[in-house]
Amino acid sequence: MNGTGSTRLPAREQPAEYSHGMYVEPLSEECRRIWHRRDHALIGVSAGNSYFSQDRLAGLLTWAGRTFAAVDVVYVDTHIDSMLIADGHTPAAAAKSARNTVKDVRRRIRRAVESAAADGERLRVRALSELVDDPRYRSVRARTDRALREVPEFAAVVDEMVRQVVRHRLGPQRLATDAHIQAGLDYVRAEAPLFTDAPAIFGVRSSMTCYHLNTPLQQYLVRPDAAFRPAPGHAHMVVRAPEPARTAAS
């Protein structure tokens, strides 16, 4: 689940509901209905994203553990090396850098779980690579891949999201190549099942995808008129810690 760092929501979109130390904003009325079930939270963590500090993760996991019957944390460890190869790294150097990036996010998550004193029976932590061969994930992946081929507006949203992420990563001085776009698309395609049918993948009645940004993909998926929508029981919300109090100027 790859956003663009810690970009704040516009003031008019700041979540209004306060829950166990977090501000939460279900992204539609249907999402709000599912949120009130409190069945399951899916927390996606992007490796290499500086937003996911150990302290933020600990706060998020503490909140989720107090709020939901079950929690799954999935960190994305797939296709990281592809982007580095597109940058010009050798495959060996890219693989080494990707391993270090994943090792770092694993360490932060592990320490956050310890800090949050999370119940190990109710909270599971897995890499995305651990899910890709699961028949439930593969079934959902087949549906999202088919939608990318057959639903033009869904494909356009995904394409623009990929380009935004790649542009943010490269900065204004570098141009994205076809290799960058393909690597970004592979990354998002691997994530997409987690945005569309977490109940099927994790075997729960309903699930909330919890993220700190309202991404273009989520904005599209919660639209009632969208040509491709999440499965019944899958909802989205923005979850953010309160902003630190500002110190008055002297």
Image (cartoon, helix red, strand yellow):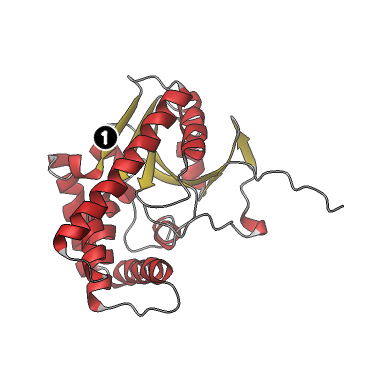
Residue 7: name its quadrant: bottom right
Is 14 placed above or below 180 here?
above
Residue 232 relative to residue 57: left or right: left
For the residue pair 70 and 119, the one nearer the viewer reads as 119
Q: Residue at x 46, y 37 (%)?
A: 54
| Residue type for callout 1 | Phe
Q: Residue at x 63, y 36 (%)?
A: 18
At label 1, counting other C-alpha atoms closer than 10 Å, the crowd grade (few under 14, some 14-19, many 20 or more) is some
Q: x%, y% of residue 202?
A: 26, 34
Residue 7 relative to residue 65: left or right: right
For the residue pair 156 and 176, the one nearer the viewer reads as 176
Res. 76 in view: no
Q: x%, y% of residue 93?
A: 20, 59
Residue 134 relative to residue 188: left or right: left
- The residue singled out by tag 1 in the image is 202
From this viewpoint, which residue is outermost toward the right?
250
Total numbered circles: 1
Residue 209: name its quadrant: top left
Res. 202 in view: yes
Q: x%, y% of residue 210?
A: 44, 43
Residue 239 relative to residue 106: left or right: right
Is 175 placed above or below 143 here?
below
Q: Residue at x 24, y 39 (%)?
A: 201
Q: x%, y% of residue 247?
A: 78, 47
Q: Secondary structure at mark 1?
A: helix
